[in-house]
Image: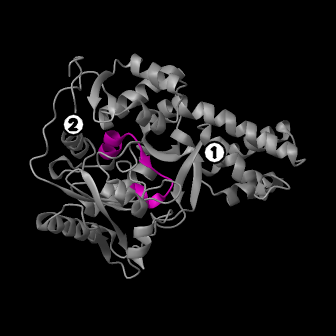
Amino acid sequence: MGDGRRHIGVAERRARLALRQRLAGGARAGSPEEVGSSLVALHGTDPSTVFLAVGARLADPAKTVGVTERALYEDGSLVRMHGMRHTVFVFPAELTAVVHASTGVVVAARERAALLRDMAAAGAPDAAWLAEVEESALAALARRGQATAAELARDEPRLKERFVYAAGKSYEGVHTVSTRLLRVLGTEGRVVRGRPLGSWTSGQFRWAPAPAHPELDPAGAQAELLRRWLAACGPATEEDLKWWTGWRVTEVRRALAAVGAREVSLDEGTGYVAAGDAGPVAAPAEPWAALLPALDPTAMGWRQRDWYLSPGLRPLLFDRSGNVGPTVWWDGRVVGGWAQRPDGEIVWRVPPGEGTGRDAEAAIAAEAERLASWVGSTRITPRFRTPLEKELSA
């Protein structure tokens, strides 16, 4: 580039994705902790996403469930908690303080204010009452170690208090104090999601006390989170960064300056990489295939996706809210989707025009067998259904 910026084209961006997202054969990880550290955050809204995302990246997927449950529920090396954009993610334990200070504090203040406002509008008890209830509930949780909302309500009956939300509106509903309060405590970093009530696909879960962590300076925490994300996902545009973090553009720019991010040229315009990361990255030795789950952090990692996702595939692979379904990848780009049928069979489709050949189809079929080998008799239904997934699973 005439302005001194290095241009990083689509081929190199796909090479970086393959290696840093642990998807190429030689880049696969040995543990879920390695996966979490490499990707920074795994989407945790759908519990099965975490396990499927880890399994797709482990060198030995047969041990996926056991080692991931160990990391989440025994060692606590991975923590499921609220993070960016008020979404539940799984983070490496060492990042919990960073996530809380960089994104959680602002969201938590907004959530608590909304709860108090909604309760006041419904004539429910006031803030002093709520403070008593939450301290009692936290004490009960500490005694139990882990508990469901129903179990906590047996210890602290005031959690069962109900109030009308948005009275007179088309979306009027009845909320319980436990549902809203536990969500607030989650965004405040005081409780986290614990072991599920059922299998690893279960959406019903227990709450647990959050691991202790220091209170960090928000600006410093934002810089650290952005530095880690750029190392995993760079280059990225300012729009990508603002979307992924949920921060204001002024916060993104301040964090970029704080970490000494390097400007590069992308096909979309200006992008950023971490300091010292502007040099060329070679492609993996062999082309690769992957079957990634709904809400996988790679498929959802960037706001601008044309460099790895054909616009024609979007209507098939995303729901109306922008949630991605299960995706099939070939050598750095999305080429189709997959699903599991009621009998357990893993099926996939690459629509015409995606430019795959026999080698790609053989590699994708092998990945489908690899996935089926460790999923076994478990049945997986994504929380957010997408057109191609619904069609394939019928």
Q: In the figure, 9 relative to 203: above or below?
A: above
Q: Which quadrant is the C terminus positioned in?
A: bottom left
- Location of residue 258 by image quarter: top left
The mark lying in front, picked from 1 and 2, is 2
In the visual, does 182 lie left or right of 34? right
Circle 1 packing at 10 Å, graded few (<14), some (14-19), many (20+), is few
Tell me the residue at 74%/56% (across/down).
153
Q: Secondary structure at mark 1?
A: helix
**Closer to us: 370 or 5:** 5
Specify the amino acid type for callout 1: Ala
Q: Secondary structure at mark 2?
A: loop
Q: In the figure, 135 relative to 151: above or below?
A: above
Residue 142's tag is 1
Residue 133 horizontal/vertical position (percent): 78, 44
Residue farthest to the left, as pictured: 285
Residue 9's tag is 2
Tell me the residue at 30%/71% (across/down).
348
Please say whether residue 351 is visible from this viewpoint: yes
In the visual, does 168 lie left or right of 291? right
Residue 20 horizontal/vertical position (percent): 25, 41
Q: Main secondary structure of the magenta part?
A: helix
- Location of residue 387 by image quarter: bottom left
Q: Which residues are magenta?
A: 33-50
Circles 1 and 2, Cβ within 8 Å, touching? The answer is no
Residue 154 horizontal/vertical position (percent): 75, 58
